[in-house]
Image: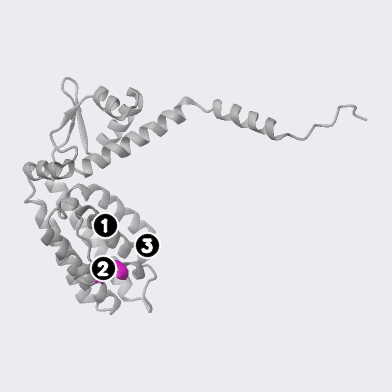
Amino acid sequence: MSTRPARRPATAASRARATAAVAAALPATAVRSNLAEQAYARLKAEIHDFLLVPGDRFSEAEIGTRLGVSRTPVREALFRLRNEGFLEVESKSGWYVRPIDFDKLEQLYDLRVLLELASVAKLCTRADDAPELDALKKTWLLPVAERLTDGREVGALDEQFHATLVRAAGNAEIARVHWDVTERIRIIRRLDFTRGDRIDATYTEHAKILRAVMQRKLDQAQLLLRSHVEQSKSEVRKITLAMLQQARAQLVR
């Protein structure tokens, strides 16, 4: 028979000490990864919000000082943004925001149209309304007096409108690809909501698309959707660096 003493149950104090020991033993790479993620999210938001515009140059040290993050996580964030096509780096002059590739943007808009048309076709063949459409009705089928006028808010709701239509169709892979496209064209789409006439047009066009989908008018829904996205696409070619600089000036006032 074993004479080993019975193990005592762990007390609250001993459990706390064990937890602290585990936390202290976490690898430094986990902490660095979290800081890199924060720096990445902050810089990407600044690009999308026109606080950083094409042509802006900066060093890793400048970004680190401004964000309060050390050089290693900053560099990880910057290279991640470079891989996504937002930034570029030169050995002598440092980092800069890449010029907008309008040809690629037009191709992404074409892909977006195909994905959304396919999703609307599925929605129009359903026997009942997709539950996700309820939230869209509350947002877009409003009296004119109740519409939002803040471009940032409307821009975010616009993304949600199109993403919800795709997601409601029920194909998770199409929804994933569509969201990737949304991420890549966001900087241009948000310029569409710096003008009051485009905000009003978005409300009107979204309401028409939504009603056509709910009434199962497939041809009309697809025609309205295509026209709506093509209008946004046509605005892309009108965008200049001056417009981006103006958008930045409006944000920092």
Compared to residue 188, the image places residue 207 above or below, namely below
Determine the residue positioned at 29% across, 26% down.
64
Q: Residues within 10 Å of mark 2 (few under 14, many from 20)?
A: many
Q: Position of residue 166 (x, y in %)?
A: 31, 63
Q: Is residue 141 magenta?
A: yes
Q: Which residue is mark 3?
A: 171
Q: CA distance from mark 2 to mark 3?
A: 24 Å
Q: Residues within 10 Å of mark 3 (few under 14, many from 20)?
A: few
Q: Which mark is residue 140?
A: 2
Q: Is residue 231 magenta?
A: no
The amino acid type of the residue labelled 3 equals: Asn
Res. 169 visible in picture: no
Q: Residues within 10 Å of mark 1 (few under 14, many from 20)?
A: some
Q: Which residue is mark 1?
A: 159
The amino acid type of the residue labelled 2 equals: Trp
Q: Which dot, 2 or 3, sits closer to the camera?
A: 2
Determine the residue positioned at 29% across, 55% down.
178
Q: CA distance from mark 2 to mark 1?
A: 13 Å
Classify mark 2: helix, strand or loop. Answer: helix
The picture quadrant where one finds residue 118 is bottom left
Compared to residue 65, the image places residue 54 above or below, namely below
Q: Which quadrant of the rendered structure holds the C terminus?
A: top left
* Range drawn in magenta: 137-142
The amino acid type of the residue labelled 1 equals: Glu
Determine the residue positioned at 38% across, 79% down.
127
Q: Position of residue 125 (x, y in %)?
A: 33, 76
